[in-house]
Amino acid sequence: MKAGMPMRRTQRFITSAMTSAAVFTAVFAWPATESAQAFPATPKQTVVNYLRSISGNNIVSGQHNKEPASAPGQYTQQVKDVTGQYPGLWGGDLMFNAADVANRQRVVDQAKTEWANGSLVSLTWHVCPPTGGSTCAFEGGVKSNLSNAQFSQILTDGSSLNKAWKQRLDEVVPYLQQLKNAGVPVLFRPFHEMNESWNWWGNRPGSNGSSRLFQITRDYLAGSKGLDNLIWVWNVQDNPAGGWSNYYPGNQYADVVSLDVWYKSHPSAADYQQMRNIAGTKPMAIGEIGKMPTASMLQSQPQWAWFMMWSEHLRGNNTNAETQATYFHPRVLNQGEISLS
C-alpha cells in the first residue's frame, strides 16, 4: 500500500479488478469530496526537485484537455467519472484557432483551480507560425512547413520574422504572468515532438535547428519577460529513426525531458534507455500517450515522473478497467497525493 493511502482506495482497487465498471461504481460510491491538498505559492525548483525525488518510485497520473478552450477540464472530469480520482497532473493548451485563443483565460483559470486542488499544471502550445496571423487552422497553420530561409530568419535576432515570433510570444505573456502571480509553476512544453515533420517547428536537427528555437524562446520568456515560474519541458516523439539527442537544447535550457509515445502503445526498453541517456539526472516524463501504463511497464521503466493521457484516448483507447487499474496502482500518484512540502 502507498504510504498514507486510505484503505478505501485499496479496497476500490481490489473491487475494480473483480467487477465491471458499472458494478464497481454502484457498489462503491465516490466520496463527495476528495482529500486534495491546496498548494501554496511555490517556486518552480520545488516542483522539479519533487519530480526528481519520486523518479524510480512513483509516477504522477496526467490527463490532457484539448480544445475547446471553453471546456478546459472536460477530460479530467472523465477521469473522475471512471475512477473517482482526479489526475495528479492537469494538462491544457494555449491553443491556435480563433475561438480557442479567445478563451485562453478559461484555460488559465482552470490551471489555477487545478493547482489549488492539489494537482500539478502543464501547458502545451500548438502555436501558429510567425509567418502568419495570431490564430490559424491546424491544417496549413500549426501543421505546415517553413522554408529553411524563413526558419533561419526566425532565429536571427532583429529580423522581421524574429520580431514577429517575439510578438507571438507576447500574446501569451499576460496569461503566463497570471500564473506566476498566483505562485503556480507551469510544466511548459513548447515545440512538442520537435523530431517530427508534421509541425512547422520540427524536423530540424542540429544546433541551428529546432533546439535553437527552444533556446531563444526560453531566453525571451524566462529572461526578457521574467517568467521564472515556467518549468521547461523538452519533448520528442518515439520516432524509430532515433537520434533524439540531435534536438536537445542543452541542460541549461531543458528542466525536464519527455517522450510522446505514438508509434507504439508503450515506450520500448530502447526508447526508455535513449531518454535516460539524454536526461541524465533530470526528471523525465511521458508527455503524451494513448494507452494507460501497465503494471509491467511501471515496474520495468520506473524513472518516468509522470504520464499524460491524451484527451479522447482516455475512453477511446482504454477500457474503464484499464484506467482504474492504472489509477489505483500503488506507484501512481493522483490529485491529493502529491506533497511539495
Image (cartoon, rainbow, N blue to C red):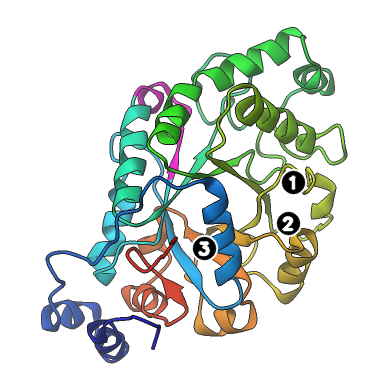
User: Do labels 1 and 2 touch, CB within 8 Å?
Assistant: yes
Q: Residues within 10 Å of mark 2 (few under 14, many from 20)?
A: some
Q: Earlier in the sequence, mark 1 or mark 2?
A: 1
Disc 2 residue type?
Asn
Q: Quadrant of the N terminus?
A: bottom left
Residue type for callout 3: Phe
Reading the image, the residue beneath label 1 is 195
Type of amino acid at the residue the image marks with label 1: Asn
Which residue corresponds to the image point at 58% horizontal and 23% vertical from the top-left?
225
For disc 2, the marked residue is 239
* In magenta stretch: residue 205: no
Task: Give the residue number, with chain letter if any, for mark 3.
Answer: 307
Which percent across, then down, holds residue 52?
A: 61, 64
Q: Give neighbour class at mark 3: few <14, some 14-19, many 20+ (Cα, 10 Å).
A: many
Q: What residue appears at the point 21 percent right and 66 percent down from the top-left corner?
A: 34
The answer to whether residue 254 of the structure is visible from this angle is yes
Q: Kindly report the distance in space between the C-alpha atoms of the residues bearing marks 2 and 3.
A: 18 Å
Q: CA distance from mark 1 to mark 3?
A: 20 Å
Instruction: Mark 2 vs mark 3: give the one in front.
Output: 3
Q: Nearer the viewer, mark 1 or mark 3?
A: 3
Residue 99 lies in the magenta stretch: yes
Alpha-carbon span between mark 1 and mark 2: 8 Å
Q: Secondary structure at mark 1?
A: loop
The quarter of the picture where residue 296 lies is bottom right
Whichever of labels 1 and 3 marks the residue nearer the N terminus, that label is 1
In the rendered image, which quarter contains the C terminus? Answer: bottom left
Which badge, 2 or 3, comes first in the chain's sequence?
Answer: 2
* Residue 69 makes an appearance in the image: no
Q: Quadrant of residue 196?
A: top right
Rendered location of residue 260, percent (x, y): 61, 56
Please tell me which residue is depicted at 52% across the width and 39% down the height of the picture. 229
On residue 5, the disc is none
